[in-house]
Image: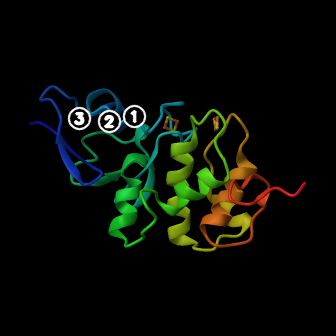
Amino acid sequence: MAFTLNVNGKDHVLPDNTPGDMAVLWALRDILFINGPKYGCGVDACKACTCLVDGVKQTICSMSVATAQGKKIVTIEGLSDMAKKLGIAVEELHPVQKAWLDLDVAQCGFCQAGQIMAAVDLLKTFPKPTDAQINAAMDNVCRCGTYDRIRNAIKKASGQPYNTEYDVNVAPVY
Ligand code: FES
Ligand code: FES
């Protein structure tokens, strides 16, 4: 029996020989060529592969294709579509992505898709999160150490005061 993955609102039938215990991460990256979710560790530690599954953050290196049957997966590629469905009109970008760009959060960028998906999940539970709530929820590893900018971007996306030092929309004071 062929497995089907629902990704970003679309059903994808996987090849007949796809094993049920294949991680969703590999089905997405190697079969469907949806490469937003990254591979860092494969053991649910780094969180680089974080996506939303049925609306809740999930590391898809640790979820099998068989387990994912009937579930709705949203990757970073589907985030702006999700925003539109929620009635959030922010051009092509989800507000969290926009805050990330405005504050120039990424350094190498490898962890950032997972960071953004985790932030979207956090803001569903805590629309105006405190630093403590951000620190507790955001357990994604960033080897470049962008944690301050991540915290700032979450504050900005949630309409709270944030450090404007990196904001490309705020004119620098010389
Ligand atoms: S690759 Fe999934 S948690 Fe590290
Ligand atoms: S920006 Fe390089 S790992 Fe996070």
Which residue is tagged 1? 35
Above or below residue 128? Residue 92 is above
158 with respect to 7 (left or right): right
The amino acid on which the numbered mark 2 sits, given as a three-letter code, is Leu
- Say which element carries label 1: loop
Above or below residue 91? Residue 75 is above
Give the image location of residue 81, x and y in percent: 34, 58
Q: Choose top left, top right, bottom left or bottom right for residue 107.
A: top right
Which residue is tagged 2? 28
The amino acid on which the numbered mark 3 sits, given as a three-letter code, is Gly
Q: Residues within 10 Å of mark 3 (few under 14, many from 20)?
A: some
The amino acid on which the numbered mark 1 sits, given as a three-letter code, is Asn
Mark whose residue sits in front, 3 or 1: 1
Quadrant of image for the C terminus: bottom right
Q: How far is disc 3 from disc 1 in space, using C-alphas?
A: 20 Å
Colouring:
rainbow
Labels 3 and 2: the sequence-earlier one:
3
Q: Residues within 10 Å of mark 1 (few under 14, many from 20)?
A: some
Above or below residue 161? Residue 106 is above
Please say if the residues under marks 3 and 2 sit with CB atoms less than 8 Å apart: no
Kindly tell me whether residue 135 is visible in this rendering. Answer: no
Give the image location of residue 142, x and y in percent: 66, 39
134 with respect to 88 (left or right): right
Quadrant of image for the N terminus: top left
Labels 1 and 2: the sequence-earlier one:
2
109 with respect to 83 (left or right): right
Please say if the residues under marks 1 and 2 sit with CB atoms less than 8 Å apart: yes
Which residue is tagged 3? 20
- Say which element carries label 2: helix
